[in-house]
Amino acid sequence: MAEKSRPSTLSVYLYVPNIIGYVRILMNCYAFAICFKDKYLFSLLYFVSFVCDALDGWFARKLNQVSTFGAVLDMVTDRISTACLLVVLSQVYRPGLTFLSLLALDIASHWLQMYSTFLEGKSSHKDVKDSSSWLFKLYYRNRKFMGYCCVSCEVLYIILFLLANNQTENLIEVLLNVSTRNWLYNTLLPLSLGGWAIKQLINIIQMKTAADACILYDIAKKQ
Amino acid sequence: MAKKPRPSTLSVYLYVPNIIGYVRILMNCYAFAICFKNKYLFSLLYFVSFVCDALDGWFARKLNQVSTFGAVLDMVTDRISTACLLVVLSQVYRPGLIFLSLLALDIASHWLQMYSTFLVGKSSHKDVKDSSSWLFKLYYRNRKFMGYCCVSCEVLYIILFLLANNLTENLIEVLSNVSTRNWLYLTLLPLSLVGWAIKQLVNIIQMKTAADACILYDIAKKQ
């Protein structure tokens, strides 16, 4: 009886969307290994990995290979790739504390949100029914808006990485001088800054909501 | 009726162990802000924050102020402070990829472990009843051993930070030259290296075990 689960475990590891997940991880490893040698190749690989992130969800539904393991693999890969990109940015820009703080906010908000999602028994942290803030509701009920904000963060970080020429750029200087760059940066940067700002605001609100949920969980448990 | 939980939420935020948690966060923020200006003050603050980590658990039990929020606050603060220390080490040492990889392993293993703990319904990821590896069992059943491994990681990272004089040290060089340093480094370094190695090995095993748990959860749900 216990032997029956064994082949099933391996078969889930070999699901197509999960294999796409492993490819994403290898692509990210290679990308970060060469990020200082070839900025543009790094950005391309990072972008392709981002596209695969959407692809594997599509494959999972198409091939009926949706799995909890796949969802966790996706989540962890996202968190780590964003974290590594922020680490690289903290090395390239002064003050590096800015990106260290963004890393802390990213980890804290996603961790707290996942924890409280589990406590409340929701199936996904993206399903939010009761939330106080209008911005929160807008964010979670409109998948396109949510997508715009998430993609904006990644686009902003990649743009900042591409804009940096030396090893210790002053962040304010680079942002002010972007008008001297080509039109692509000139349009993408403000657009992504807007989405990024909303996402960080959401992250902060999420931390408070999740903390409240932890406390309410204890109260409910006592009753 | 709905108004009653409101004062309770604030009172939990003001629990003594949670206030210690906020102090830990502020201490860490200040420590990382000055880490390059004063290495020894940074190490002292980091160490004090680590001691507070044990203290707030003790206070929580003594004052009957144990809370889920407090546990999550602790966990998130630990993860972020270790992450920031690894980021700093990746800036100071070449190859920086080593510490980036350790950061990825730390995030991935703790994230997967927490996720699977919730799926399997254990109360804390530190309560592991069924686990295949003997090392795994040894690690989780002996709290002192677990403590030694966790403390070793932090001690090793702090020592590596203190040993670095310039901003781009070669990791192998520094480790080989430690015999020329004082006896304190000479004894602490090998001791902490062993505990660190065991902890990283346990992290890797944890990832596999947690991934299996995610798959078995799906299988159990279908039945």
Image: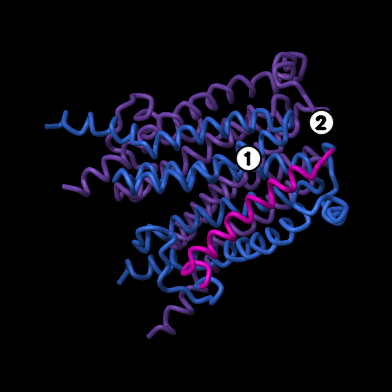
Chain colours: A purple, B blue
Number of residues whose C-alpha sits closer than 10 Å to that of mark 2, classed few (under 14), some (14–19) or many (20 or more)? few
Q: Nearer the viewer, residue B3 or B32?
A: B32
Residue underneath mark 2: A167
Q: Position of residue A103 (x, y in %)?
A: 59, 36
Q: Secondary structure at mark 1?
A: helix
- A24 sits to left or right of A116: right
**Type of residue at label 1?**
Cys
Position of A211 relative to A17 (above/below):
above
Q: Position of residue A10 (x, y in %)?
A: 52, 74
Mark 2 — on which chain does it sit? A
Query: Is residue B159 in the magenta section?
Result: yes
Q: Which mark is residue A204?
A: none
Query: Is residue B211 in the magenta section?
Result: no
Which portion, as a residue range, is magenta?
B138-165
Q: Quadrant of residue B69?
A: top left
Q: Quadrant of residue B123?
A: bottom left
Q: Nearer the viewer, residue B74 or A48?
A: B74
Circle 2/circle 1 CB separation < 8 Å? no
- B181 sits to left or right of B21: right
Q: Nearer the viewer, residue A54 or A174?
A: A174
Residue underneath mark 1: B84
**Type of residue at label 2?**
Gln
Mark 1 — on which chain does it sit? B
Q: CA distance from mark 2 to mark 1?
A: 20 Å
Q: Secondary structure at mark 2?
A: loop
